[in-house]
Image: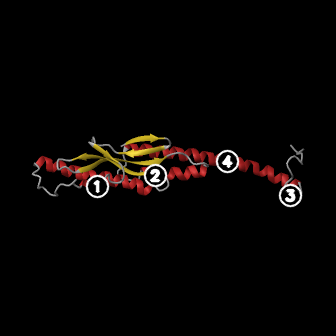
Amino acid sequence: MSVSSVGSSLSFSPSFAAPTSRAGGAGGRPGEAQGEVQGKPQGNAQGLSEADLRRVEQLKQRDREVRAHEMAHVAAGAGVVTSGASYSFETGPDGRRYAVGGEVGINVSPGRTPEETLSRAEKIRAAALAPADPSGQDRQIAARAASMAAEARVELATRSRDEDAAGPAQAYRVAESGGRAPATGSALDTYA
């Protein structure tokens, strides 16, 4: 798989075979999805050799794998998927077009808050690892999401620690003022 970066989006793109054509969308143009013929009869009426028939079977298998892989990314990536699956096609010896590569756009930017970033990172990781056999690029994106989540957790822990440290001082000021929080600058702490 290869990853193409567009702003804060990445695209999953398995490219195991060199495509001879490219079409966007979930299945390219109507009538071309999953090896359908462009106005050609179905079956072996084309007189294909045994080698050509084997190649067609390989392309059919690859087409199924690519489509299942990309749909797994889409299904698991709710909220972070920026575009549906787009496929690269190869025309087989039978004249049909088979998907041999694909990509799904994923927004990998952090959230506005550490909590939002943590939630988004978990969704990105789930989308990246959704296929049954994640590629190296899928694993890289999952690792990047895990790093983003770790940074968000550190920020949350730091914030929590800072709030906890301010807690006793604030409680002391409330007790000194007779149960109500003093106005800013209205009390001088002479106890050291």
Gap between marks 1 and 4 measured at Cα: 51 Å
Depth check, front residue: 153 or 69 = 69
Instruction: Tell which circle, 4 or 3, labels the residue nearer the N-terminal end.
Output: 4
- Is tag 4's residue or tag 2's residue first in the polypeptide sequence? 2
Q: Residues within 10 Å of mark 2 (few under 14, many from 20)?
A: many
Inter-mark Cα distance, 1 to 3: 70 Å
Q: Which residue is mark 4?
A: 159
Indicate the quadrant containing the N terminus: top left, top right, bottom left or bottom right: top left
Amino acid type, label 4: Arg
Question: Which residue lies under the disc numbered 3?
Answer: 180
Instruction: Select label 4 or label 2 by which is in front.
Output: 2
Q: Nearer the viewer, mark 2 or mark 3?
A: 2
Q: Residue 33 bears which disc, if any?
A: 1
The x, y position of residue 151, in whole percent, is 57, 44
Q: What is the three-letter code of the residue carrying label 2? A: Val
* N-terminal-most mark, 2 or 1: 1
Which quadrant, please, contains the C terminus? top right
Distance, label 4 to label 2, CA atoms, is 30 Å
Looking at the rendered structure, the secondary structure element under dot 2 is strand
Q: Where in the figure is residue 178, as x and y percent of width and height?
A: 89, 58
